[in-house]
Image: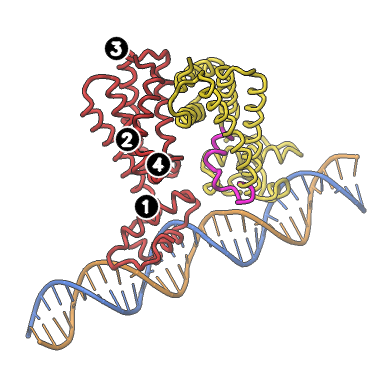
Chain colours: A yellow, B red, C blue, D orange
Amino acid sequence: MTSPAAVPRGGGREAITRAARESFAERGYHGTSIRDIAARAGLSLSALYHWHAGKQELLTALVEESTEEYFRRCDEALRDAGDDPAARLRALVRATIEYRVSRQVESTIAASEWRNLDPENRERLDGLRAAASKLWADLVDDGVARGVFRCEHPDDARRAVVAACNAIAQWYEPDGGVGVPELVERYTAIARRIVDCR
Amino acid sequence: MTSPAAVPRGGGREAITRAARESFAERGYHGTSIRDIAARAGLSLSALYHWHAGKQELLTALVEESTEEYFRRCDEALRDAGDDPAARLRALVRATIEYRVSRQVESTIAASEWRNLDPENRERLDGLRAAASKLWADLVDDGVARGVFRCEHPDDARRAVVAACNAIAQWYEPDGGVGVPELVERYTAIARRIVDCR
DNA sequence: GACCCCCGAACGATCGATCGATAGGTTCCG
DNA sequence: CGGAACCTATCGATCGATCGTTCGGGGGTC
């Protein structure tokens, strides 16, 4: 159990959000009942409905906040990175890894439970996802156009880099000895080799 | 609808297996009801239970067959690849891509619904999964030890290569212009750059 | 006493699973 | 060669459990 301690009065919203995050991560959206969530939060079903509109809203809020944070991180990283494609590649690798590690649970939920969003919610968030994806595509295409990246197939190189960075969330352990800065160094080096950066 | 045609007598098992595969892929294990599966197969609930032991058995059979095929493909590819680490790397990349493309649906189910296997089934299959993972680890470690691969962090290089190959199942479209042999060429090149193959 | 948080009880729907019954095919006996 | 006996593949009906959601009330704190 994560929270054997009683929920302080007024802390219901937070407790339920955290319980939903943990339950969705462990058993998936359809594998989790709202009774699981309420029990894990140490509250009743009614408290859940007092703070949230329902099960779908719990998932949407989690995924939306997580997706927005990823896009914001990427956007800021690129804005501070200057013009050099190699530096910009490092910036996106760093933003992606920092996001995937700091939001390890939510980012995994966002990736695997995307299809369980209501069509309207999914449509709305698809825009953000596409925008983040475009940041990667523009970056790689620009590097290739300027001759800094020499890979023959930019789309495949981009997909490989993104897949490698995203996969970190599936095996990384915060107390496992290797810190985020070191991780960024290693994966920046890998990314540069993938795009064949001169 | 995939099968508007009536199921020929005796073809129930196949029809239900296919319907389960499609339903699990579209909506996930917990998102699929056995009534969904039976209806998709054009049969009744009773027919499903005549041919299969239940919902969990349908998932287990799918995942088990898929996982076994992957391990077998890897094993055979390595046996035919000789001793050169670069050739062996290509062999595993090819086996992984061919598996991920030819069993695009099942391999995605196996990856995303692994946690929904009963503990006993999951334990049994964890061995196979670990064995396949060890093939990759031994290959990369051997290449590094012999100085053929010069990457500084073999574990990260291996994870990056595997993640890139596995991700293919999430975007590949069989009629999308690029064939499997070409795909193998591209990702072998990417893999060799990742491990810094001389 | 008004308001904020939270509870237990209950709703109809749907879940996975099981039941007995039956239509169509094959086997076997006289 | 006819038909009773048997088997296979399927069906509709139904089980108890659990699902997401709703409702009316009660115990705090101002």
Dot 3: what SS?
loop
Mark 4 or 1 closer to N-term? 1
Span colored in magenta: A105-122
- Are the residues at dot 3 and dot 1 in contact (C-beta closer than 8 Å)? no
Q: Chain of mark 4?
A: B
Dot 2 corresponds to which residue?
B181
- How far apart are labels 4 and 3 at the CA level? 38 Å
Kindly report which numbered mark, 3 or 2, lies closer to the viewer in this rendering: 2
- The three-letter amino acid code for the residue at tag 1 is Leu
> Would you call the spot at circle 4 few (<14 residues within 10 Å), some (14-19), or many (20 or more)?
few
Of D3 and A184, nearer the camera is A184
On whether disc 4 and disc 3 are found on a single subunit, the reply is yes
- The three-letter amino acid code for the residue at tag 4 is Gly
- How far apart are labels 2 and 4 at the CA level? 12 Å
Find residue A2 and report its horizontal and vertical position in percent: 59, 34
Kindly report which numbered mark, 2 or 4, lies closer to the viewer in this rendering: 4
Of B176 and B7, nearer the camera is B176
Q: Is residue A116 magenta?
A: yes
Dot 4 corresponds to which residue?
B177
